[in-house]
Amino acid sequence: MGFFDDLIVPDPPEEPQPEFIELGPHAPGETSDGPPVDWFLPATVPVAREVGAGPYVRVMLDGFSVWPASVTVHLSVFARRIRTGGHHGFPGHGRPGAGELHVGLLLGDGRRVTTLDGDPYPYPYGTAERLTLRPMFGGSGGGFHHTVDLLLGGLPPAGPTVLVVEWPDEDVPETRTAIDAGEIIEAAGRAVEIWPNLEAPEPRGGSQGFMMITSGPVGGMMGMALRGVPSEHGPGAEQPDDEDRYEPRPEWPVADGDWEDLRLIRARLAGGADPEAMIGWQGTALHTAAAQGTAEVVAELVRHVTDVDLPDEDGFPPLYAAVRWGKGANAAVLLGAGADPTRSLGTGGSVGRLALVTSLAPLFERQAGVEPLTEAERAGQEEADRLIAVFDDVDTEGMGVAFVGGLDEEEVIRRLGADPEQCPVLDLENEPGPYGTGPGGFDPGDFDDALHYVGVTAVPGGCVVSQPMGYLPGNDEVLLPLSAGTVACGIYFNPKGSRYGSVVRDGHVEFDDELGFDPDRDSPAGHWLYRFWQWGEDGLRNGCELAFLAATAGVRPDDAGPLTEAPRRWVRVPGDH
């Protein structure tokens, strides 16, 4: 027997955790990131033609791989001399430099698409992607030969099509070569789908896990998600029974989920925790339970307070906390205990009337003293909710926005100190420019320069002034001249978290404060109408600040395009910013 043999405990067998990657269905279309190589075998259009030549290089067109909705352009570059020191000078992935190989297509409908085109700013600027010509990863060849694959992000339209090549560093002049777009369009129908009628994989249970690769809403390989692998600490996992957790203590718990644990709340009450003391930003224990707890916990706390309508630091009762978080069962317990649904919330009206615009309306419609909403009030709330929905999906981080009522684009541009004739309407589909901001545009990556530019877009009721990454539209120096004879409302969504908004009416600042938090009892009625107060399952907080400011300025956009797409016009605002 060995020296340690009697002390060794065999390791337990490891439970197998097999994982595999499964292909999901392909959505129509592809992105500019790459063709659908996992789903299709492309049709080929063979070509062997010189499309550019210099003293030491030849650029050859080596044919096309045609997918259902995109085309890979194959180029082969041959050289009879190359640079030493590790830099061979062949074009690589990404946007080429000023002296590198430039490739473009002049399409049959007059559009120009090139490897020098910039991405639209902000991106994406529309529901349909602009046609792009992008270098693809990879490439192969020998020491004096290199392949260059370019992806045309759509099929070329019918009509005369010209391939244009130049390479300044290699003295290759601009060279134009006619290509047969009809042959390419016909070949798209010959691409072979490898997995027709492919269905999304079903998640596996137990210890089985899998990853699914699927194409996104506009195609291309998107993310992979691991599913079906249970966590020892996840839902359904057995939790240890910590008796110490239920020892009587005089302080209230701090974790949100604790307010759903009736045994824990009873233990804290037994330990002397004060049910009427303010314990945080949500108010007393009853306020907190009304917002986060269960009906059983609320009922237990109701038995230990002297006033079921005791106010928090803002003067709001627990019933308001239940309404703002959409907790119908908790609200029912409070009402049954005598909570007053007609209690005033200042300019917001009563708790009960506020609840009439939430999912809790059926509960409060039956309460005595709660007056039904008038048709005008319902119409106002419906319009507010429509505007909130318009802006709900806007990624506002770092964005500056202003709404100006009653002015057209030309007048807004003049008030910004620019000449409307020098700010033409953008046509980024045909002329994206090197930075995606138009032929005479600016570089969004140069923050100091980009900060001078704002977008101007006409919408119903006025104009939207936007800056995808900048504070200018929320500044008084911009809002004051825009507000002459009208209303201009602006906001800056600071990435650090603050959201300061301004309402300027005919040169007078009416409001200048942080938005996005609970209104107080004296807030304008619009603050309540636009649901800054609402959280939980009914929460409509996304977009509420933009909706409030747009409505205050009298601007009624039908969609969020002025903020999610490129503006109609870029305007350079003079001055130091």
Image (cartoon, rainbow, N blue to C red):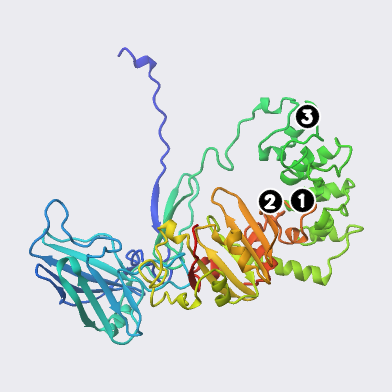
- Alpha-carbon distance for marks 3 and 1? 28 Å
Q: Is residue 95 left or right of residue 549?
A: left
Q: Residue 381, image x and y in percent? A: 75, 66
Label 2 is placed on what type of residue? Answer: Phe
- Alpha-carbon distance for marks 2 and 1? 9 Å
Can residue 10 be seen here? Answer: yes
Residue matched to label 3: 273
**Farthest residue toward the bottom?**
159
Select label 3 or label 2 by which is in front: 2
Q: Residue 323, image x and y in percent? A: 77, 52
Can residue 558 be seen here? Answer: no
Which of the 4 quarters of the picture holds residue 105?
Answer: bottom left
- Alpha-carbon distance for marks 3 and 2? 29 Å
Residue closest to the eye, 276 or 196? 276
Which of the 4 quarters of the picture holds residue 437?
Answer: bottom left
Q: Earlier in the sequence, mark 3 or mark 1?
A: 3
Taking the spot 76% from the left edge, 69% from the top edge, the residue there is 380
Q: Secondary structure at mark 2?
A: loop
Label 1 is placed on what type of residue? Answer: Asp
CB contact under 8 Å: marks 3 and 1: no
Residue matched to label 2: 517
Select label 3 or label 1 by which is in front: 1
Q: Secondary structure at mark 1?
A: loop
Residue matched to label 1: 520
- Dot 3 surroundings within 10 Å: few (below 14), some, or many (20 or more)? some
Residue closest to the eye, 272 or 386? 386
